Image (tube, rainbow, N blue to C red):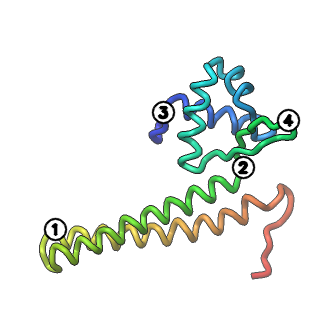
Amino acid sequence: MQSGAPKMMARVLACLYTSDAGSLTASELAQRLQVSPASVSKAITFLEGLELVRRERDEGRRERYIVDDDLWYQSMIRSARDNNRFAEAALQGVAVLGPGTPAATRLENVARFLDFVSEGIVRAAEQAREVLYTKPGTPPDDTA
């Protein structure tokens, strides 16, 4: 919630992450959180939009909502892409406003900043992904 997620969305995400399987059905979420199925549905839709949760159908044709390590990686990569889009828009603004104007200079600085941060996010996400997929007690692959 402190990072901006609405309360119900944060509760659903926390419930999924603290389940042993990392997945629950809508009815299981509603029961565990003691909320209505509609509240769960709304929260899942929000979390799916952020690519923090994904849906799968189980053998009983019920939808299961899943969180796994790769979702955080994908979230970071999406964040970097979003930053790149902002940077591109800022550079377009520089062209519109005319280089050298105070507003254009501000936009150019924003674009450079976002480009730098995005590169760092992608690099860190790639390195962290290796850690996520290393089983406990297994040394990381040092062959690179």
Write the residue at 55% across / 68% down.
122
Q: Residue furthest left?
A: 101
Instruction: Give the residue type at disc 2.
Output: Asp
Assign a secondary structure to mark 1.
helix
Q: Looking at the image, is mark 2 or mark 4 nearer the viewer?
A: 4
Residues packed near mark 4 inside 10 Å, few (<14), some (14 to 19) or many (20 plus): few
Label for residue 103? Answer: 1
Q: CA distance from mark 1 to mark 3?
A: 34 Å
Judging by the rendered image, the residue that carries numbered circle 3 is 6
- In the rendered image, the vertical position of residue 33 relative to residue 49, given as above or below: above
In which quadrant is the C terminus drawn?
Answer: bottom right
Judging by the rendered image, the residue that carries numbered circle 4 is 60
Give percent across and percent down for residue 61.
Answer: 81, 37
Residues packed near mark 3 inside 10 Å, few (<14), some (14 to 19) or many (20 plus): few
Give percent across and percent down for residue 140.
Answer: 79, 68
Q: Nearer the viewer, residue 85 or 73?
A: 85
Instruction: Give the residue type at disc 3.
Output: Pro
For marks 3 and 2, the one nearer the N-term is 3
Instruction: Give the residue type at disc 4.
Output: Gly
